[in-house]
Amino acid sequence: MPFTIATWNINSVRLRMPLVQRLLEERKPDILCLQETKCPNDQFPEKAFKALGYEHIAIHGQKGYHGVATVSKQPFDDIVRQDFCQIGDARHLSTRLSIGGRRLRVHNFYVPAGGDEPNPEVNVKFKHKLDFIEEMRLISAEAEPGVSSLLVGDLNIAPFETDVWSHKQLLKVVSHTPIECEGLLRAQADGRWTDLMRHHVPMDEQLFTWWSYRSKDWAASNRGRRLDHIWGSQDLAPALTAIDVMSAARSWERPSDHVPVLASFDIA
């Protein structure tokens, strides 16, 4: 059975709902996971999603900051909102549903950006980020017997040299510092997750999902980073048929600085 999931840091779902609509109409993913929705639950544009055929909606939002949402063509049979680091931020949402004959758990994450100074002793935002990814080590792809798992979202870390435009120049820049990259890869290994994007795209090929607003011509400079990720339980890797980073969306009107990433599967 063909199945596609999309993940996108939308940087305000209400502001950029026309872009979301364009994505859903053009690509028609079965599930869309959004991050940085920036609205409380009661202001989420549910009617617009339902009009597009996405009747099933799970939200974990807060006013003005953060927020994650998962919309689906198929119903959820379980929804979990986890508070990481006991701060009360809306940064995680987990849903479970059935795709064909397979049960599937989908984790939707928005990892803290971490501020500008990569020193946890002087930057509480960076310490929060490190603590957050340490807690992510407890999220296992094999937590539920008989249930496959996906972990998607804006993880705000580009772990490999080819995930950034310049490894040497970004080693001391938050999102690519060794302590962050090592922490994220530990969480991936401890949870027995497969990096599905790198499973499909060779490691020697540069892969970016984010381009700064500060660049006058993002496409010409191409100073990108892979901050958005799709991980899966090991049983999903053989079913993966495509990874599509929609870089063209960075040039849409009033864009997010992130672009949608889609993973397609042929699930038995």
Image (cartoon, rainbow, N blue to C red):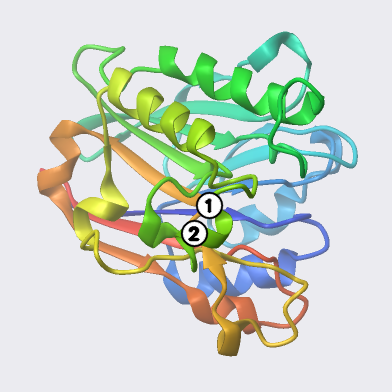
Sequence-wise, the earlier of marks 2 and 1 is 2
Location of residue 75 with respect to 217 vertically, above or below: above
Q: Is 233 left or right of 93, judged from the image as shown?
A: left
Estimate the spatial distance between the alpha carbons at disc 2 and disc 1, rounded to whole Å.
17 Å
Q: Nearer the viewer, residue 8 or 27?
A: 8
| Viewport quadrant of the C terminus | top left
Location of residue 135 with respect to 205 vertically, above or below: above
Location of residue 190 with respect to 162 vertically, above or below: above
Q: Which residue is mark 2?
A: 168
Identify the residue shown where x is 56% and y is 35%.
109
Residue 139, percent from left and from top: 41, 17
Q: Nearer the viewer, residue 34 or 156?
A: 156
Circle 1 — which element?
loop
Query: In which quadrant of the rendered view does residue 63 lie?
Result: top right
Identify the residue shown where x is 42% and y is 17%.
137
Q: Is 135 left or right of 215, judged from the image as shown?
A: left
Q: Which residue is mark 1?
A: 227
Residue 222, percent from left and from top: 54, 79
For the residue marked with disc 2, what is the amino acid?
Answer: Lys
Label 2: few (<14), some (14–19) or many (≥20) C-alpha neighbours in 10 Å:
few
Q: Nearer the viewer, residue 64 or 114?
A: 114
Circle 2 — which element?
helix
Residue 267, percent from left and from top: 16, 46
Identify the residue shown where x is 58% and y is 62%.
52
Residue 157, percent from left and from top: 53, 44
Which disc number belongs to residue 160? Answer: none
Q: Does any portion of residue 76 appear in the rendered image?
A: no
